[in-house]
């Protein structure tokens, strides 16, 4: 129980790889050497329940637990709650799996893209950087002060509220909005 609580706190503070190592030391040696993967990290935060349910409904658990690496922009439960009433309940229905998969893969980028990588790209491209997602769609990244803002194909802007949550197979950037493809 303590290890799970530490992992949840560590994941929400961006210190997952560092803070979970002492807790993991009580487990098998190999487990102590590896940080949780993207799915395990999202499951441990307490603020990504909707995202985890959607990933399960879309059948993407194995993909997001694979070696990757992936960069995932992870909307919080509060972000999903901002969608129109009934949207999430409709999306997780089996008949909407394709749409849900497209939305979720629109939140993922191949490779390990840190916030400093994003900032460098934004500066290199004159204040805006285009990012191609696993779904094949485009996201636009820009800065507002020190905050990275991601704009989806529908023109909805979301802030990265917590960057660089390291996992064994990539990185998570927590967002305050859900991205919708065109």
Image (cartoon, rainbow, N blue to C red):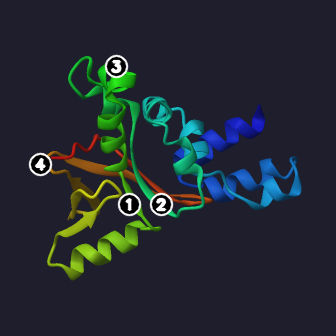
Q: Give the alpha-carbon distance from disc 1 to disc 2, as whole Å.
A: 6 Å
C-alpha gap between disc 4 and disc 3: 23 Å
Label 2 Cα crowd, 10 Å radius (few <14 / some 14-19 / many 20+): many
Q: Please say if 7 is above or below 49.
A: below
Which of discs 4 and 2 lies nearer the camera? The answer is 2
Residue 14 x, y percent position in the rendering = 53, 54
Horizontal placement of 70 versus 127: left or right? right
Q: CA distance from mark 4 to mark 1?
A: 19 Å
**Image location of residue 62, percent across then percent down:** 57, 46
Please name the residue that numbered disc 4 is placed on: 155
Position of the N terminus by quadrant: top right
Left-right relation of 125 to 22: left
Q: Residue at x 18, y 79 (%)?
A: 125
Circle 3 SS class? helix
Residue drawn at x 25%, y 28% as measured from the top left: 82
Q: Looking at the rendered structure, which numbered label has been put on residue 70?
A: 2
Q: Which of the two discs, 1 and 2, labels the residue nearer the N terminus?
A: 2
Q: Which residue is mark 3?
A: 89
The answer to whether residue 174 is left or right of residue 178 is: right
Q: CA distance from mark 2 to mark 3?
A: 26 Å
Check the image and name the residue furthest to the left: 155
- The residue pinned by badge 1 equals 109
Corner quadrant of residue 144: bottom left
Front tag of 4 and 1: 1
> Between disc 3 and disc 1, whose residue precedes?
3
Return the disc, 4 or 1, that comes first in the chain's sequence. Answer: 1
- As helix, strand or loop, the secondary structure at mark 1 comes to strand
Distance Cα–Cα, label 4 vs label 2: 24 Å
Crowd band around label 3 with a 10 angstrom C-alpha radius: few (<14), some (14–19), many (20+): few
The mark that comes first in sequence, 4 or 2, is 2
Residue drawn at (65%, 51%) of the image: 36
Which circle's residue, 2 or 3, is located before the other in the chain?
Answer: 2
């Amino acid at each position: 129980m303590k290890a799970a609580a530490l992992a949840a706190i560590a994941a929400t503070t961006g210190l997952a790889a560092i803070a979970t190592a002492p807790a993991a030391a009580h487990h098998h040696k190999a487990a102590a050497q590896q940080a949780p993967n993207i799915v395990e990290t999202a499951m441990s935060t307490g603020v990504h329940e909707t995202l985890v349910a959607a990933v399960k409904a879309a059948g993407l658990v194995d993909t997001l637990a694979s070696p990757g690496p992936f960069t995932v922009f992870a909307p919080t439960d509060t972000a999903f709650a901002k969608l129109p009433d009934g949207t999430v309940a409709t999306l997780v229905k089996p008949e909407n799996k394709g749409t849900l998969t497209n939305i979720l893969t629109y939140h993922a980028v191949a490779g390990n893209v840190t916030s400093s990588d994003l900032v460098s790209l934004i500066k290199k491209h004159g204040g805006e950087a285009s990012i191609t997602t696993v779904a094949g769609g485009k996201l636009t990244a820009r800065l507002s002060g020190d905050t990275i803002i991601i704009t989806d194909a529908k023109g909805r802007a979301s802030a990265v509220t917590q960057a660089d949550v390291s996992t064994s197979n990539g990185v998570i950037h927590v967002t305050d909005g859900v991205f919708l493809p065109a």
